Image (cartoon, rainbow, N blue to C red):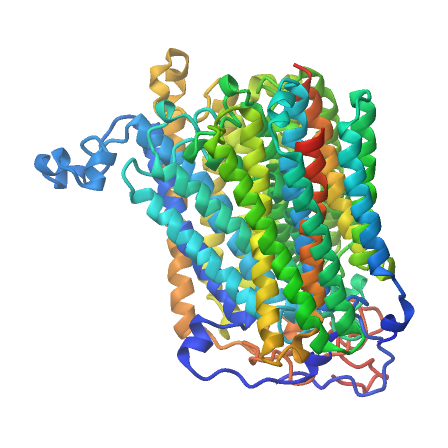
Amino acid sequence: MQHSPVTQPVVAPPMASPVPSGKLGMWWFLSSEIVTFGGLISCYLVARLLHPSWADSSQQLNVLVATLNTIVLLVSSWTIVMAHDAVEHGDVQQAKPWLGYTILGGLLFLLIKSAEWSGKFEHGILPWSNGFWSFYFAMTGLHALHVLGGVVINVALWIAAVRGRLQPIAHRVEYAGLYWHFVDVVWIFLFPLLYLA
Amino acid sequence: MHGTAQSDIHPAPSSFLRRCVFSTDHKVIGRQYLGIALAWALLGGLTALLIRWQLAWPGTPLPGSDLLSADFWEGESWLARSLAHGSIESEFYNKLFTMHGTIMVFFVAMPLLLGAFGNFLVPLMVGARDMAFPRLNMLSVWTLVVASIVMLVSIFVPGGAASAGWTAYPPLSTVAQYNSPNWGQNLWLLAVAIEFASFLMGGVNLLTTVINLRAPGMTYFRLPIVVWFQGIAAILFMFSVGPLIAGAVMMLLDRLVGTGFYTPSMGGEPLVWQHLFWFFGHPEVYVIMLPGLGLALDVFAVFCRKPLYGYRVIIWASIVAGALSFIVWAHHMYLSGMDPRLAMPFSITTILISVPFAVMMFAMIATLWGASITFATPMLLALGTLLIFLLGGLTGIFLGSAPMDIYLHDTHFVVGHFHYTLFSAVFFGGFAGIYYWFPKMFGRLLDERLGKIHFWLTFIFFNAVFLPMHVVGLSGMIRRIGDPTLYAFLKPWQPANVFITVCAIFLTVGQLVFVVNFFWSRMFGQRASDNPWQSTTLEWGTSSPPPHHNYDTLPVVVRGPYEYSVPDSPQDYLPQAQAVVAGPTGRA
Amino acid sequence: MDRALAHSTNYRLVLYWLLGLAIGSVLLSQLPLPHTFTVVLIFVAATVKAWLVVWYFMHLRFEHMLIPALILTPMLAFAILLLVLYPDIAWR
């Protein structure tokens, strides 16, 4: 039982921020991810500056394959924003193929990455081969885990679309998109850091 | 979407499983966190007693060891392998202080202050029906349960619990030949990582709730200090834990895969771990400090029947302290071998951070000034928070200055310092919160007489234990040594160690008073009305305990949180959501 | 939702810029130019790409001030960590 509520009219504006809760929650999560990857990247940056010889190891990376992977991820970033665009324009059904392309993009990225890794293993390049490789495998590995997570989220939304049940949760396409774009931005920095610098 | 769903009242779930075990109700989840924290506190307290036993009477078998046969002690049981005929050897001692620190920081302080009070209070205090993401909330608490199970398992695996300190510095923590626990240390890393995930989810939930789910009229500067401090703590956690997660990934890879992130021979650098750990570790202590202080501050206002002096100043001070907390961390590393030129800037920032906390202390004192104080148990504990934190903060200033820290680092002076600061927030602040909000959580009041006994025993024996530690620390007794009598210069101080241990035993016995009070009052305590403390904040405007949907009608907030003894008001206090009183005959 | 009408972002154009900058960076890295110059340009390009994704794809241009604050604050924390790690680790 509560005390009697306000009995005279009180002008009380709504207090929420203009950002919907789901989106705000996702941005808070992404902000913590920025420091997580940021921490790993700072360690790599300072270690790399301390060890100029790591450039030799970096030369052994296949820039062409990684460029292909970069293109795949950038395109998949575009496809998921198109999915969101479809939802925004009220065409929820159209989101399904765009989500599908995004998932394919993510899977292709992971496939190419695994091929890259197994290639390295076959040449005797392992995470403990030297400091550069330790960072390379740790950073791309952590990133790949995040890509996998993103693929899982996108698949969940795609399944909902296939079953015709995307409409009530259509706003989540945007939130999944935010996560996917973040994963893309991390790669935008990892790629030059590891392969080009 | 902006809280419009809040106006629907969903019926409460009916099955036991959905109501009490897998509940999405923030109040149930808050109580689950409380249970987890208090259960772990028992184990954390046990490790403390064992540490003190060893320091007072090194090598003496634990009481009751002779009840077990010699054959048992020669055997292969976990207990026999851990203790040498009942006495604590150095390897086991290392496990004890490691687990004590880990348990107290990650499994008691955070679940109690952020998990229990954050979850239970914040939705009620902002005037919402639940957190922004109730199912995520359920996931957070069950993730903590998983982390707890992993940590418990780590104690019993071959090799036993982790033993590299709660700080786990490499190479001790990464090189197998230096550190005998293998799976214990790995599982320790995993458990802490899972715990971080749990609190990251909680932080996302709490911050979204505070920003988006406030009731109409609840502007930011009408929020109780509890909510402000929980929010700032969540922000500090969210922005500081990332680098340590990165560091923990690197440490796990070093241990499991053989990478060399922290191994100099492989081009790695052990000091990086210390930077990553303390970059998180320092904001972490404020993640613990602020919610505890926040609980005490709210209690102050109620039992002084006065608005909190300098409400806005306190908020700005805590924001400044939070920001500064990101640039003080290397004061834990003055002696680590880091670049000595870093010592001066970090000394400056560390001494600076005492200023906002001093501001908060002065605000608390000013609140007391001229107040009509009721010395109920919550208020006694809140006063204890103030006093103990004051002492802890003062010793912190010495430690923050690099020249002094060169002498004091890794001595018991540091142990005394951080127990004063942490205990003030976790135990005095946390208990103040428990005694004050117990009626709201459980519908009954804790016994006041037992409460006062509990307070005095805790206060007296806490000081008896930790004040002398500063002295033995200054005299050169270093941390993490299992047998002080091995050092000739420490032998004269052994009576002090015995004294501290005896008082620690009494301190522990004093907590039994609380345990008895807690369980007895749960069943037989005096039933609580909606607002037994005559408080203004929103949670006291609904039943004790609140219904599943918190409020029959969502409150509309018309005033600030501490309208006590308002001049010219016919009422002693003005609840936040109560109608504006229209004259001498106006009644609530 | 008026946002659908308000923003007329040409997502495809943004994609072309992203791809162009990516491929351009790779080509630049293969040229025999001074190393520091190349590295700086490549990171400028990466920052521009990241900004394009965040501003257009993540709709930062339409978001309330709160969101940029949520991005900038952790980046500040990252910068602080880097600033302290650098002298301690890289200058040895």
Q: Nearer the viewer, residue B105 or B429?
A: B105
Q: Nearer the viewer, residue B547 or B367?
A: B547
Q: Nearer the viewer, residue B254 or B520?
A: B254
Q: Quadrant of residue B227?
A: bottom right
Q: Is residue C68 visible?
A: no
When the figure is inspected, residue B88 is found, relative to residue B442, above or below; the finding is: above
> Which image quadrant: the C terminus of chain B?
bottom right
When the figure is inspected, residue B536 is found, relative to residue C91, above or below; the finding is: below
Residue at left offset 81%, top offset 87%? B585
Q: Quadrant of residue A159?
A: bottom right
In the displayed structure, does residue B258 sit left or right of residue B78? right
In the displayed structure, does residue B42 sit left or right of residue B26? left
Residue at left offset 32%, top offset 34%? B53
How far across and down, in percent of the image, does residue B218 sit? Answer: 78, 70
When the figure is inspected, residue A61 is found, relative to residue B130, above or below; the finding is: above
How far across and down, in percent of the image, does residue B464 sit? Answer: 46, 36
How far across and down, in percent of the image, does residue A120 sit? Answer: 51, 33
In the displayed structure, does residue B44 sit left or right of residue A28? left
In the displayed structure, does residue B327 sit left or right of residue A12? left
